[in-house]
Image (cartoon, rainbow, N blue to C red):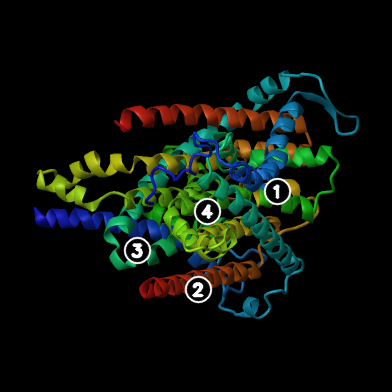
Amino acid sequence: MTAATEPLPPPAAAPPRPPKAMRRAAARRRRVPYLLLLAGVAWLLVFFVAPMVYQASTSVQTGTLEDGFKVTWHFATYWDALSEYWPHFVRSLVYAGIATALCLVIGYPLAYTIAFRAGRWRNVLLILVIAPFFTSFLIRTLAWETILADQGPVVSFLNDVHLLDVTSWLRITQGDRVLATPLAVVCGLTYNFLPFMILPLYTSLERVDGRLHEAAGDLYATPFTVFRKVTFPLSMPGVVAGTLLTFIPASGDYINAELLGSTNQQMIGNVIESQFLRVLDYPTAAALSFLLMAVILAVVTLYIRRAGTEELV
Amino acid sequence: MRLIRRLRANLVVIAGVLALGYLILPNLVVLAFSFNKPKSRFNYTWNQFSTDAWQHPCGVAGMCGSLTLSLKIAVYATLAATVLGTMTAFALARYRFRGRAATNMLIFLPMAMPEVVMGASLGTLFLNMRIQFGFWTILIAHIMFCLSFVVTAVKARVMSMDPRLEQAAQDLYATPTQTFLRVTLPLAAPGIAAGALLSFALSFDDYIITSFNAGNSVTFPMFVWGSAQRGTPVQVNVIGTAVFVLAVLLVLAGQLVGGRRKARG
């Protein structure tokens, strides 16, 4: 990453009016970026922006599948959806929030190890982080069913050390089961989105100059102080990027809640999916989608403002 | 003091290795259970070692068909997204123009949007335009969500390239086409390759967006999802493991070639 400021094309027109051919060349050159953009931007406008706009109109429609839907500016759909499904919203945000925090706690040491302590193993470790991606994430999530199975080694171990009593008391597991409990869903979410945390963390840690650590050490900072005052603040861009990349998809996810949880752990994604694909209530599905986006936007804005002012200074 | 420091340093490494174990563990389980001979339809508990599934990887109705469909879509989506994305990335990295900030935003949004929202809205649009769900709608959706990732990967690479190399080529009387083919493109290639690889992986693996736009077509992730309720066949583990091993080998080979090239140059 050498170029912090990007190269600019030379200014098109100089004071003495250039000959016609040159002016034409400059005009052609100005057209180049638009021509390059045309296809990609058009694709996103038609298949990303237009659906969103259409979705907005769907959310204020009423009707049935047989008679067709009409825009009636029926904003009550939003209210009805929110009053019926607010527990799902809360649950999605809580699960996604916890999973994001866990990803940060679990991912940071790994990113740190790869960036500063791996030496010639660095590339191997990076490959190992990316490698799980190559097995379909559905298959890997199903593997968690095996790992957390009722008579499986993990559950027996947790039972033996009486941790399950604690987690049951905390209401994150039930009896001597882990599957079909909040713990399983959060475990799955954490697992699924961990690489999205590690990679940005690694990218920003890699840019931190190791000599800064030495300098801090020379100034009698303890390793913890070095981390708190030097390493962590410098890795803040990675922390912010990683948190967003983890939190946003996690709050819309429904795979983990479906495969590892029970009906008591359904997230808002599960509701949108079933409203759209099974109940065929498109206005409600659309309203829920917009509510989800609004909630995420609010949380993310708040977070960026906090992370941007307090911790970054 | 030194001992404590060393211990603390190793503590980080130990935590890191544990995290890596957490990441790899399910893959090991998938590998192990691809050699299982399950007692019932459900391949959750270990019963008996067997290589049956590896000998008959296509022995399950519908699975290899879905695999072919997924591969086909991933190839087409990757080709399209890579071409469109590379063009967009060059425009964004090399030119200042009106609407650049808005375009950057447009590229960023699909990556920051929950998949369920994107899938549902695109599905609603297709539904209301009465477009038949199937191969084409899946392909359109996949190109849409892969595009941003390709743009991001290529843009990062192009922005770190030294524009003076291209100027040097022009000074040496290379035509714009020659400059592009012999200087710019080779320099941007690692970014383009990374974008293409990412796009292939994303497309091959996508379940959420696909499920809203697939109609009756069944991609491999959709097959896995459907089979999860009825009991996943062992062959699913075989495919998962095979793809994993192949991909790791490919990446390792790429690393070796890249490393050797770097050593030479």
Q: Quadrant of the C terminus of chain B?
A: bottom left
Q: Is residue A274 visible?
A: no
**Residue type at tag 1:** Ala
Q: Which of B246/A168 is in front?
A: B246
- Discs 1 and 2 lie in a common subunit: yes
Q: Residues within 10 Å of mark 2 (few under 14, many from 20)?
A: few
Whichever of callouts 2 and 4 sits on the residue coming sooner in the sequence is 4
| Cα gap from disc 1 to disc 2, whole angstroms | 29 Å
Q: In this rendered view, identify the residue nearer to me: B93 or B259.
A: B93
Q: Is residue A77 above or below residue A189?
A: above
- The residue where tag 3 is placed is A122
Q: Is residue B109 shown to the viewer in this render?
A: yes
Residue B154: mark: 4
Disc 2 to disc 4, C-alpha distance: 23 Å
Q: Viewed as shown, does residue A18 lie left or right of A113? A: right
Q: Residue at x 76, y 29 (%)?
A: A58
Residue B141: assigned label: 1
Give the residue number, with chain letter if any, for mark 2.
Answer: B249
